[in-house]
Image (cartoon, rainbow, N blue to C red):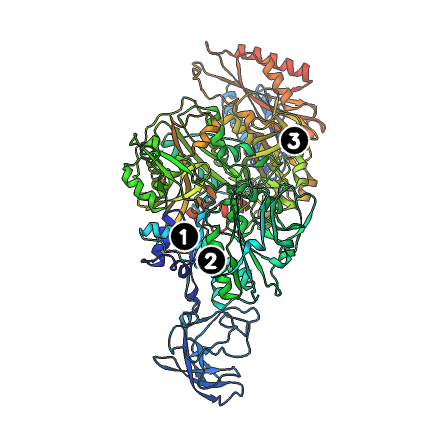
């Protein structure tokens, strides 16, 4: 909300600098987000008088002017055809920034410096209306009133040195959405009186009730409806001061009637609406809802379909305005309007909110009504508007005003406990101090009978412009605000009573550290993506009903697509060797009820690692090698080892899924927990990646509850271990896991460790076969093994391998 | 015999240099080292020698075999590690063999630091879903339906009643539904806002929420906790201020500002010339919230606070465009 300092000063004496005022407003909850010095753009501009004009010796279209700027005279070369001696003109001096450069096609600002124009020195610029940003006239310089004092700052002369505060008003403070509202706070802060202008409307002898009849059918949604009728007005442009003040607070001037209603809105916060009374059938105004299936054209020339719950202002034939939101085209003020009916009503916030949402319309009026206007201000606002209209647009105000207010809204009465105020805020404040603070912001003491005997209680009446204050806690906040948050002590000692819940251990940092230690870089990506991408990994896609764009219409079902995007972008920027990981959520929509929090939705925390490019950084003594499947699988195996997770199985599935090919599933206790694989060629192509990408994904929840948190010490072996190597030649379809299984099954309890240390395939063993060599470690917990014992076990193993796997043992 | 040993030794040493592949190496092994290879044959011949010559010849033969074996082993390692010839060098200023270096994403680093400080103050971590219902995201947090406060947070909807959480605050409700006071938790997580993407705002970001509910918790304590946090995080010399604000689920509500550490409070572009940086929102839990979770508002009180991790990271690291945090350009990430 834009608040003019000049305007504020009409209601409250301000005895501090604009910056100090901004600070104190901020500290009482009305945050001043910025201060705009309107005059600042006319720094180094003054009023000057042209004393002498001579032709430029070398340029026909230029003149050399001597200009009196008060303290001195300056020489300015001017190109304007209308410049003449004796004129009072706006002069931009050296260092002034001309708001719009006339010779720049985009009208960008131009800084004035000392120049020589074809041999003649020029020390400034005489400006046009366009250049000063005051209008569109580029034809010649702006000539000011002859009486303008020479040498004064131009901003003063133009009356544009106001200061505008941009205030972020929170939704609970509709009372602060006006100049009087802000002035009221300033008066409270400075502890001085608010001065409200007295209004004395001159009326004629005809009573409004002879011509206008107002009926409220929906009293619940429209508790109060007031109005005045003004006849004989002449519609036209508003005076300059009114247009300028409205523009400075961000409102576009329209015509003198509408401008007045907007001025009153910005002054006191009460939205008004002006109807062309001659278009209101039979002078009848009916406030009602329940109109269905009707297309109504609003002032913005849009046709809007009404709903039965839309509160409408109607005449005896037709709807004429959407109550509290926007007027109708059918009763709009036009050039030919002569009789104006001004509406000043109080509508129920919920009703206006619903309507504004339904139409997707947020207007200055609806914003105030839906937050809660002041029901007691309708007549004041009406009189102010009427008074202004007759002085600006002429005409006369009819006698009396309409004021339909069947059930006066009661003042709210709240009882607070002084002890509660002190307990909750952690301060010591007396009842008297509290009364002082609250009366400054218009609270009144109600001295409710039941509170008289208890000194801890205080009963208060809430001012009508504070719809947000309904409970004791709301009053406590007001006390805290007026006491000053900064005056509440900082209590740094807090008792440490921990909950008896034992929170689960946070494993994510451990997982993260493990991969960072292995040289992987963590990434964080967007969880929204196109539907076509999200469906690659799952059909159970969560779709967003109101996405920002088609590119972010679904939630991800896998971390891989956004990872591939990151890989592509990095390769594109010249980094093609990448080792990345992300820990993030994936999201699913189910048709059955399975979610942990919401019936049909579930989220999984996943880990994704992906490698592409070289296995190692470039080294001077080593040929670069591309990463391969076993690099990625090795990281995953090391990770499992690091977190002491066993019972892991890697199961080879030839055709894994839509995103990957050639990979293995990771199973823990026969349950799927993730996979390692190559990204499909087609997918890589879709993502414009030429290099191979190998990835692994792990469902974090599947592993976390299997991590053994409690470690238990196992006695170290007392007897030496023995190592035996064994190499076997096998058919290519026999996989490592089968061999390992066979060795384990036959190795007895003495076999403690199996490690593959060599593989070979080639001519020496026959083209179709392969050879694996293992190192086996044996020891016993209770004695030193003899060669014979191990030979026995080795024979067992060899037997098993020869019979079960048809292996040939190489010796 | 000695002559033969010498010859074989020389030819093996010469031949190994021409070996390039594993197949050739296997041929080398069979020629020299296999049971009936050249060396093996000599061992067989050992038996025919005079008994007194055998120990010495045996030693020579062992040396030969060891030498051939070591030539073989060395070559094998060389071929397998796919290295070019690993040269001996005297230039010790050559770079060492480095590994890739990874790091936590700057958002994780920021969050970890925040967590570390709150852990010290006795806070635990709680978690909740990103896909939420209207009840937890708004209603139970005292945002009534048809209330303008809902406009403060532009929401992505999945259905009428299901949405992407706009803040981590719904987890407050979920924690209090499950647990009786004392509750002292922080809730880090991802949240979503349906706002146009620009240098200053992204469609999602991360928050850390805090909640402490117990007997006799005061606003003064809230200030104490947050000032302690801010001093730990931003440095003990910082100046701060609390100013009134509005959140439906806290009352009184406040925003905490610290002096802009980029301009030392003089005013700059980042602090919009105010000299202050807003770092978090906070307040005393509104009694209406206790009604939703079945706490007795007369017996307990509490405070809540929340801060945006992106905003803090951007301030800390001088990042002027939020989008770069989600682009994951490795040249950017390597700076952290
Ligand atoms: Zn600054």
Res. B324 visible in picture: no
Report the chain holding disc 1.
A
Q: Which residue is mark 3?
A: A663
Pointer 3 or 1: first along the chain: 1
Which element type, helix, strand or loop, lies under badge 1? helix
Q: How many marks?
A: 3
Q: Label 3 lies in what chain?
A: A
The residue lying toward the viewer, choosing from A783 and B65, is A783
Q: Chain of mark 2?
A: A
| Label 1 CB less than 8 angstroms from ligand 1 | no
Contact (Cβ within 8 Å) of mark 3 with mark 2: no
Q: Which element carries disc 3, helix, strand or loop?
A: strand
Mark 2 highlights which residue?
A384
Q: Quick one: label 3 or label 2, which is nearer the N terminus?
A: 2
Mark 2 vs 1: CB contact within 8 A: no
Q: With B95 as the anchor, is A335 left or right in this view? A: right
Residue B54 locus on image (x, y percent): 52, 21
Q: Choose mark 3 or mark 2, whichever is in front.
A: 2
Relative to A684, residue A179 above or below? below
Camera-side residue of B192 and A667: B192
Q: Is residue A591 visible in this depiction of the protein?
A: yes
Residue A182 got which mark?
1
Q: Nearer the viewer, mark 2 or mark 1?
A: 2
Q: What is the crowding at mark 3: few (fewer than 14 residues within 10 Å), some, or many (at least 20)?
A: many
Using the rendered view, name the quadrant where residue A428 is placed. Answer: top left
């Amino acid at each position: 909300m834009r608040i003019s300092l000049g305007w504020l000063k009409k209601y409250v004496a301000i005895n501090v600098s604009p910056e100090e005022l901004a600070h104190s407003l901020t500290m009482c909850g009305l945050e001043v987000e910025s201060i705009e010095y309107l005059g600042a753009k006319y720094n180094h501009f003054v009023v000057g008088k042209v004393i002498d004009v001579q032709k430029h010796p070398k340029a026909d279209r230029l003149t050399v002017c001597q200009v009196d700027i008060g303290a001195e005279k300056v020489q300015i070369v001017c190109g304007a055809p209308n410049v003449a001696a004796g004129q009072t003109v706006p002069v931009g001096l050296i260092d002034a920034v001309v708001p719009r450069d006339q010779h720049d096609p985009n009208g960008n600002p131009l800084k004035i410096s000392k120049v020589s124009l074809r041999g003649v020195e020029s020390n400034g610029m005489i400006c046009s209306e366009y250049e000063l940003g005051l209008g569109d006239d580029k034809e010649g310089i702006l000539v000011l009133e002859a009486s303008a004092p020479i040498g004064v700052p131009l901003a003063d002369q133009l009356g544009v040195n106001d200061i505008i505060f941009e205030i972020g008003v929170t939704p609970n403070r509709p009372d602060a959405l006006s100049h009087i509202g802000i002035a009221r706070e300033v008066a409270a802060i400075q502890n001085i009186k608010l001065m409200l202008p007295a209004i004395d409307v001159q009326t004629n002898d005809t009573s409004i009730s002879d011509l206008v009849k107002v009926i409220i059918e929906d009293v619940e949604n429209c508790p109060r409806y007031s109005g005045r009728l003004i006849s004989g007005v002449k519609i036209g442009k508003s005076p300059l001061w009114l247009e300028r003040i409205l523009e400075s607070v961000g409102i576009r001037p329209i015509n003198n009637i509408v401008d007045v209603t907007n001025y009153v809105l910005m002054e006191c916060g009460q939205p008004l609406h002006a109807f062309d009374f001659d278009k209101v059938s039979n002078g009848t105004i009916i406030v009602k809802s329940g109109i269905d299936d009707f297309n109504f054209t609003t002032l913005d020339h849009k046709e809007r379909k009404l709903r039965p719950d839309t509160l409408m202002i109607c005449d005896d034939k037709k709807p004429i305005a959407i109550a509290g939101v926007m007027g109708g085209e059918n009763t709009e003020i036009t050039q030919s309007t002569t009789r104006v009916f001004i509406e000043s009503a109080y509508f129920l916030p919920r009703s206006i909110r619903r309507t504004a949402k339904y139409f997707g319309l947020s207007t200055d009026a609806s914003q105030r009504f839906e937050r809660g206007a002041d029901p007691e201000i309708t007549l004041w606002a009406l009189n102010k508007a009427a008074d202004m209209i007759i002085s600006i647009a002429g005409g006369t105000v009819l006698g009396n005003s309409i004021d339909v207010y069947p059930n006066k809204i009661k003042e709210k009465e709240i009882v607070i406990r002084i002890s509660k105020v002190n307990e909750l805020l952690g301060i010591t404040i007396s009842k008297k101090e509290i009364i002082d603070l609250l009366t400054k912001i218009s609270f009144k003491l109600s001295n409710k009978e039941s509170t008289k005997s208890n000194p801890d209680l205080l009963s208060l009446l809430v001012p009508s412009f504070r719809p947000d204050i309904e409970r004791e806690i709301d009053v406590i906040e007001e006390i805290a605000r007026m006491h000053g948050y900064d005056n509440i002590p900082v209590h740094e000692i807090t008792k440490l009573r921990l909950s008896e819940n034992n929170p689960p251990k946070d494993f994510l940092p451990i997982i993260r550290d493990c991969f960072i230690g292995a040289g992987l870089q963590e990434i964080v990506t967007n969880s929204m993506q196109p539907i076509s991408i999200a469906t690659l990994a799952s059909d159970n896609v969560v779709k967003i009903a109101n996405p920002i764009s088609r590119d972010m219409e679904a939630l991800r079902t896998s971390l891989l697509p956004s990872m591939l995007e990151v890989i592509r972008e990095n390769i594109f920027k010249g980094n093609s060797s990448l080792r990345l990981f992300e820990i993030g959520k994936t999201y699913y929509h189910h048709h059955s009820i399975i979610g942990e929090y919401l019936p049909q939705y579930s989220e999984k925390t996943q880990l994704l690692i992906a490698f592409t490019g070289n296995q190692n950084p470039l080294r001077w003594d080593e040929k670069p090698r591309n990463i391969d499947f076993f690099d990625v699988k090795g990281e995953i195996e090391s990770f499992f080892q690091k977190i002491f997770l066993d019972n892991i199985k890697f199961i080879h599935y030839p055709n894994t899924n839509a995103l990957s090919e050639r990979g293995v599933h990771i199973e823990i206790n026969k349950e799927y927990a993730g996979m390692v694989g190559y990204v499909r060629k087609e997918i890589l192509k879709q993502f414009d990646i030429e290099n191979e990408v190998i990835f692994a994904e792990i469902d974090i929840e599947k592993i976390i509850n299997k991590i053994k948190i409690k470690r238990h010490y196992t006695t170290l072996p007392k007897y030496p271990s023995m190592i035996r190597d064994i190499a076997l030649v096998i058919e290519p379809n026999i996989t490592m896991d089968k061999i390992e299984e066979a060795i384990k099954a036959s190795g007895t309890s003495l076999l403690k460790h199996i490690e593959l240390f060599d593989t070979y395939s080639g001519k020496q063993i026959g083209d179709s076969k392969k050879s694996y060599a293992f190192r086996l470690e044996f020891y016993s917990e209770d004695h030193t093994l003899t060669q014979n014992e191990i030979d026995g076990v080795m024979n067992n193993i060899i037997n098993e391998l020869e019979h079960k796997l048809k292996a040939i043992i190489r010796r | 015999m000695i002559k033969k040993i010498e010859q074989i030794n020389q030819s093996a040493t010469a031949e190994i240099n021409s070996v390039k592949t594993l197949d050739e190496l296997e041929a080398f092994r069979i020629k020299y080292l296999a049971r009936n290879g050249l060396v093996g044959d000599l061992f067989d011949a050992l038996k025919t020698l005079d008994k007194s010559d055998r120990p010495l010849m045996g030693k020579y033969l062992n040396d030969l075999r060891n030498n051939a074996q070591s030539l073989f082993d060395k070559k094998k390692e060389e071929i397998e590690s796919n290295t070019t010839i690993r040269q001996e060098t005297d230039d010790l200023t050559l770079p060492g063999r480095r590994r890739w270096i990874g790091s936590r994403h700057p958002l994780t680093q920021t969050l970890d630091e925040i967590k570390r400080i709150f852990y010290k103050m006795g806070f635990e971590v709680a978690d909740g879903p990103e896909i939420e219902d209207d009840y937890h995201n708004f209603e139970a947090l005292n945002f009534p339906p048809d209330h303008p406060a809902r406009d403060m947070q532009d929401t992505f909807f999945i259905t009428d009643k299901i949405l992407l959480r706009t803040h981590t605050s719904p987890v407050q409700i979920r924690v209090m539904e499950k647990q009786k006071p004392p509750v002292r938790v922080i809730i880090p997580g991802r949240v979503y806002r349906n706002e146009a993407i620009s240098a200053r705002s992204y469609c999602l970001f991360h928050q850390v929420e805090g909640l402490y509910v117990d007997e006799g918790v005061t606003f003064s304590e809230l200030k104490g906790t947050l000032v302690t946090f801010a001093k730990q995080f931003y440095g003990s010399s910082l100046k701060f201020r609390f100013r009134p604000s509005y959140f439906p689920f806290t009352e009184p509500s406040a925003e905490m500002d610290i002096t802009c550490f980029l301009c030392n409070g003089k005013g700059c572009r980042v602090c919009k010339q105010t000299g202050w940086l807003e770092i978090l929102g906070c307040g005393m839990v509104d009694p209406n919230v206790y009604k939703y979770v079945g706490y007795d508002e007369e017996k307990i009180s509490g405070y809540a606070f929340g801060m945006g991790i992106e905003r803090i990271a951007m301030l800390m690291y001088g990042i002027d465009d939020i989008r770069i945090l989600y682009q994951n350009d490795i040249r950017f990430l390597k700076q952290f």
